[in-house]
Amino acid sequence: MRVTDLTLGLLTLLGGIAIYLSAINFHAIPGQDYGAGTMPRAIAFVTGLVGVFIITKAVMAGERLPGLQLAEWTRSGSAVLRMLAVLGLIVAYIVVSPVVGFLPTAFCVMLVAMLILGVRIPTAIIVSAVTSVAIQQSFGKLLLVPLPRSDFLNFFW
Amino acid sequence: MSIVIEAANLVFQPYVLLVIFGAAAFGMFVGAIPGLTATMATALLVPVTFFMDPVPAIATIVTATAMAIFAGDIPGTLLRMPGTPASAAYVQDAYAMTQQGRPEAALGASLVFSSIGGIFGTLVLITASPVLAEIALKFSSFEYFWLVVLGLSCAVFISPGSPARGLIALFIGLFAATVGLDNPAAVPRYTFGSVEMMGGVQFIPAMIGLFAVSEVIRAFIKRASDVRPPAAMSKSIFRQQATNLVTYPVQALRGSILGTAIGALPGAGADIAAWISYAVSKKFSKTPEKFGTGHVEGLVEAGASNNGAMSGAWIPALVFGIPGDSITAIVIGVLYIKGINPGPMVFITQPEMIYAVFIVFLLANLIMLPLGWIAIKGARHVLSIPQKVLMPVILMFCMVGSFAINNSVFGIGLMLIFGIIGFLMEENDIPIAPAILGLVLGPMLEQNFVTSMIKSDGSFLAFFERPIAAGLGLFSIAIWAIPLVLWLLHRRSARQNLT
């Protein structure tokens, strides 16, 4: 998913304007002219300049209309689904792990990910199980990271 | 001389040496896990040091830190998941070398030149601490502002592709750094009412997202089974580095000097040092076009600079008790607990302790070589695992590493967002690395800029009134102006040729 230079320049310019507008209401340090809005406004100003520079270069190179070039992989339905699946697995971990606990969630996420990539089922089950327990032991026990616990798998902690 | 012998007696005890080995293994383990940092390794060791005498306590922290900083290069080289912002400076070259079937060459260069940089920094620490610390303390907000601008400019210019795209990446990072309460007026910015957003965007989840998650997404799109793991090299790690040492002695020395000097500035540290060193290496290289394609030259210079800066950060810490970075801040606390009060008097009242610390530094950087060799030999087997099995495991490490920063799934959410941003950036040839440095140095840039503007009553001329600030400022401006002038001259001559 690649945008043309003209589109990139326009997006950058719009980004700069948006940052500037959002920073208008940030207060200064009492009694001073500078404060929370200074840095975002400086970023907005230079971002806008970069946007104008890219637009100018694109127009000089002959671009007239903004556009979007779709990458080769976007034409393959299965590739798009696999990309959405990996994002979905991360969201699922965020939602499910605090409720169900680390071990079952990590096992399921890795298992599904491996099956999507075509790993054979027995291999996927063994690797997912061993890795989940290894991470739980190293992070949870050795490094004392409070990974979400599972009530029914308490003996691992 | 008797003080040195007394200090050596304190260090060369079986118990202390055993502690050093244990700490080295621990540092290597923590540093090699994506998402865990040298600072985390240091913090985890603090409770352990309560039960130790001063020398083994300091030895534990020094050794673990040195190992963890080197070990951060391992996931960066093998999996494109840099362990520290400093290793992000040369991750492009290191990962490209892995893809060319030369992971051991990349890791070997990191190891050997990290050790050289660390030893050089320690020698400077021993011989010139007070002088360097005096100079470092002359840096005010004006000098720090220009130093950060210099670091950020280097990040833009060393990135592959056009500087305009590098600037877009930089401003994505700088904008992300504005999120939260950590600003001069302590006003919540872009938090949308979320308490967790008030803490700002932590760079570890962002870095994992930008580098690693974007790579995982790409592997899923390509269906990782199609990706062939690169062949492992069998050539000796150290023999290759002897060749590098003969080929790039100037680069190794320059990286060590620059790293130590920048590391000695409180708050600057290894992150800026590695980026500036990489840029300097590219600028003075005979083959700058090879940078970013798997060329070892930048690794040599930035690797030496990285660990040189780590030793350099101890200069203000020991001489004045001023921490150079988060690690030395923790260490100063440990020193106080152990009855060693850092400051000029410690060199007079407890010289044997200080010399013992120096000996530990040298030992830690020497022990890094055999232990690093073992770690490299072990870690390269990761590459023989099929990608379709490895990618889901990496994804899980990414999530746990992001979680471990604040012990909250908020970090995983950040990782996901930055993963998508990183993927889209790379699809559009926008380099990732400047965004990381923008995120890391954004708060420092803002603080020093606003402080300087208040001090100077809004006058930009004040940024050039102090000699060091003027030098750094003119150098930074020259970095931007010279390519622009050359481009304009080139266009003019091309137009004249046409007419």
Image (cartoon, coloured by chain):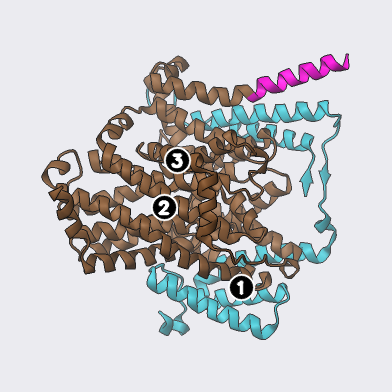
**Chain A's colour?**
cyan
Q: Position of residue B137 (x, y in %)?
A: 30, 31
Can you say which quadrant of the picture contains the C terminus of chain B? top right
* Same-chain status of marks 2 and 1: no
- The secondary structure making up most of the magenta span is helix
Amino acid, disc 2: Ser
Q: Secondary structure at mark 3?
A: helix
- In the picture of the structure, the residue carrying the numbered disc 3 is B253
Tag nearer the camera, 2 or 1: 2
**Chain with brown colouring:** B
- In the picture of the structure, the residue carrying the numbered disc 1 is A109
Q: Secondary structure at mark 2?
A: helix
Chain containing the residue with disc 1? A
Dot 2 alpha-carbon crowd within 10 angstroms: few under 14, some 14 to 19, many 20 or more: many
**Residue at the spot x=38%, y=55% of the render?**
B66
Q: Position of residue B247 (x, y in %)?
A: 55, 45
Dot 1 alpha-carbon crowd within 10 angstroms: few under 14, some 14 to 19, many 20 or more: many
Chain containing the residue with disc 3? B
